[in-house]
Structures are given as C-alpha cells and as structure tokens.
Image (cartoon, grey):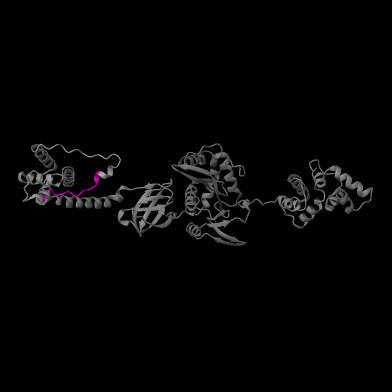
Amino acid sequence: MDSELWGTIRRMRTVDKQSISAIARQLRIHRDTVRRALASEAGPPANEARGRLPACKLGQFSRYIADRLKEYPHLTASKILLEIRKQGYRGGYTILKEYIRELRPVAAPAAFLRLETQPGEFAQVDWANIGSVTIGNARRQLSCFVMVLSYSRMMYLEFTLSQRTEDFMAAHVNAFRYFGGVPQSINYDNLKTVVLSRVGSEIRFHPRFMDFAGYYLFKPVPCGVRKANEKGKVESGIKYVRTAFLAGRVISSHAQVQAEAERWLAEECNVRVHGSTRERPVDRLEADRARLMALPGNDYDCAIAASARATSQALVHFDSNRYTVPSGFAGRTLTIKAWPRRVAIYSGARLLASHVRCYEKYRVVEDPRHYAELLAQRKKAQMSQLVEAFLGLGADSKEYLRGLGASELNLQGQLGKIMALSAQYGKCEVNAAINRALKHQAYGAHFIQNIILQQRAARNMPAVQQVVLTKKPQWTKLAVEETDMALYDELFEGNTYE
C-alpha cells in the first residue's frame, strides 16, 4: 500500500460515505487492506509502494488470491500461480509474488534468550562438508569437525575424509585430548551419527555412539528440530572457520590442510580476543579444565569393523581397495579393523596383516611376506616338475641327477639348463651326452653342452638355429614329443634295395 492508495481509501470512506466492500470492489483490493488503511492515522512509509499496481494488474484474480491466503496462509506464490493460470491468468510471476507479499503478514523474528554455561559443563559439536580433495586416482569428500567448549569458546578443528560414525567418534577422542578432559554434556544437531530417528520428544540414539558416550560419561543433548540457535556457538565457529581459515586457501592434500589447521588454532583462533567474552579462549580454558571430567586410562576403540572373505589370491576388499593377507588364509572369512591411518586384518583374535590405509581407489596394498609361503610352494612344485622331466630323458639321468645333487652347483638351475639343451638338440643327443659325462664324472650343464657340440662337430653337423616367433612368442614354449628314429631303422631291417 502506498500513500496515494491510503488517501484514496480514506477519502472514499469519509467524504463519499462508501462501504468497505464497495471501496474494495472499485479499487480491486481486499477488504482487509481497506480496513488497514482506515485504521491507520498516517500514510505508509515510502518503501511500502507495492499494493495497488499489482492488484490492478491482477484484476479479477486478486479476490481469489486473498481468499486462498486467508484460508491457507502458507501457500506459496508458485502454487497460487498454477491455480490462477488454470482460471485464465496470463500475467507474470513477479507481480503475483509482490502482491502476495503485501497480503501475507510478516512474522516477527523469533527472540532467543542468551544462556551462559558454567566451566566444563557444555560443549557443542558440528560437522560440515567443505568440498573434496584429490588423493592419487580418487576424489574424496572433505569434511571439517568442530567442537567448541561453551564457556571458554576454545575450539578444536579436524578435517576428515568421510563422515562415518567411527571417524566422528575418533575426532571426539582427539578433541578431548586437545582440551585435556571431557565436558559433562555435548550439544548436537540431529546428525545421523548421533540420532537415528526422532518423533516428537521421542529420540532414538545411535547405539554405538551411545556406547561411546557411556565410555566417556558425557550426555549427548540433541537440539530441537530446526533450532540451530541451540548450538549457536559452534554454528558461529563453523562460520569463523569458513571465513577466517578456509576462505582463499588452496587445499592440496588432507595432510596439508590438517597441519595448517593445527597451526591456525594455536596461533590465531584460540589466542584472539573473542567477540562475545572479550577474552582469549586460551585464557578461559583453565577454568574449563578445572571442571572437565578426566579422560579414561585407554582410548575408546573407534575402529571401523567389518568382515570379508579373502579371495583366491589372498586379497581382502575394503573401501574400494584390496589388502593382502598370508596365502594360507585365501578363501577364509576374516575380520577387518580400520583406523584413519591403518588397516588391520584378523582371523579370530590373531593379527594376520597390518597395512597403511590407502585412500585411493582400486589399488592393491601388498606385503611381500604374505607371498613367501606361496612362492615356496610354487618353487617346490616347479622343482618337482623339473626333476620328473629330467628323469624322463633316459636310463642314465637318475644316476646323473644323484651326482648333480652331490655337487656344489645349484640343482634347479642346472636341471633347467639341461632341459633347455634337450629342447634345442633333442633327447637323444642330450642322453648320449649324459652317458658320456657319467663315465668321466663330469657333472654340470656346461659339460653336457660341450659334449653335444663335440659330437656334432665330429659328425660334421650344422649348428642348431634358435627358432624365434615374434608374433607368437608363447609357441616357442610348446613341448613336442620327440620321435624315436630307431623306429625307422626297424622298418628297413632285412630288406635289400638295389
């Protein structure tokens, strides 16, 4: 309503003696607007110039809009726009929104009582998303955990790479250590890590978090629904972190931002003169510490606990990565416990593996010792196959194997070289060389090779050319059964050819 409309209404009522309904009908405004103008002895301020023009442009729909808002005060302008467009309205959204703002009563801002707590009595906690950080091949969400002691305004700040309940509890433990004790009660928003569900005054707390609270003896106090003012100190703390610490800062890694946060707490945040107390939080902390509850002898175990079956390759999956366990536990169901910097794997109470936690994705985190048993088994199997193949060369190979074993040479290496000569020259030539070497007690692959070369030179035989298949190199490893040439000699026995 502007001053012109206010004056017109008063003139029509006082001078023309028209009724409220007649004035509203002629000016196309609501009767309540007419009553409001008549009840006011002075015109509205200059900035209240929004009633008449929209009402005039809305025309026949202004009455419908006013009635709808009277019946349902919380209807939105967008909802009413859909309704009147079905009735033929062709105007815009902005003019409608201005008209509804004029009609709808403006609620007075809520007033809150300022409460000051006693030292050690209360702390407030919040957790905020602040973006993400790149770790190797992965992009991880970055959150900041803030705890503020209500009396001293001493702040603890920690950055986490997830918002699991376990990370939330671990940040509490670090905060308690930082402050030197545990507050009697802690205020929270209705975080899922604290409150699972809430119906009216009935609150269902997260069971593991309540176990954690019972261990440290503090009382969790959730705020009322949509009442962030009940933890205004930590809300202000989050805002202060965003503006005074994070604003303009380039975050390259989780470790970097956490180290810088610790310096900022010590050098700026907790040594500044606080706007409300007009004292430094670090100076008021002494009063808090005198009333904080003592820390227990051991920290609460905040590890993430899960079970997983090890694969046939002795790998256990956790958080998009794989961690090795001793090969003897492949295929078994094991227990995983993970902390922010470490992953441990157990079989019952027995610790099998301990790895540095990886925050990348799809990586294999290995401990070479876990493959020692498997490699030993594989080496033993390879040796067994090698001995079996060597014994198949001929009748003299068993005795020659005994002599090789008694020598100071590496048995597996020598057998491998002799079998390579067999693949190159054939069993017959190698067996003949073994027979000759036995007579001279010459044990070793180099003796066998020299004998073969001497025999071939005596028969004027050409050197054997190594076959190289560049496109199919795996074919060079194929084993082909060697044909016994004596078979052909038997076919020609007793036959004479001219």
Q: Is residue 324 visible?
A: yes
In which quadrant is the N terminus drawn?
top right
Task: Determine whether 454 is above or below 307 in the image.
Answer: above
Q: Position of residue 261 (x, y in %)?
A: 50, 41
**Most prominent secondary structure in the magenta stretch?**
loop
In this rendering, would 6 be left or right of 450?
right
- Residue 222: name its quadrant: bottom right
Residue plotted at (27% across, 40% down): 469
Toward the viewer: 329 or 81?
Answer: 81
* 405 displayed left or right of 357: left
Farthest front residue in view: 498
Foreground pick, 224 / 90: 90
Residue 39 x/y as whole percent: 86, 50
Number of callouts: 0
Q: Is residue 318 above or below residue 139?
A: below
Q: Nearer the viewer, residue 280 or 338?
A: 338
Q: Position of residue 35 (x, y in %)?
A: 85, 52
- The image quadrant that residue 413 belongs to is top left
- Residue 428 sits inside the magenta stretch: no
Q: Is residue 299 left or right of residue 278?
A: left
Q: Quadrant of the C terminus?
A: top left
Residue drawn 26% across the image and 45% down it: 475
Q: Residue at x 50, y 39 (%)?
A: 251
Residue 158 visible, this orientation: no
- In the rendered structure, does residue 484 fall within the stretch colored magenta? yes
**Which stretch is magenta?**
476-486
Q: How far from the left and from the top, in percent, is residue 86?
A: 75, 53
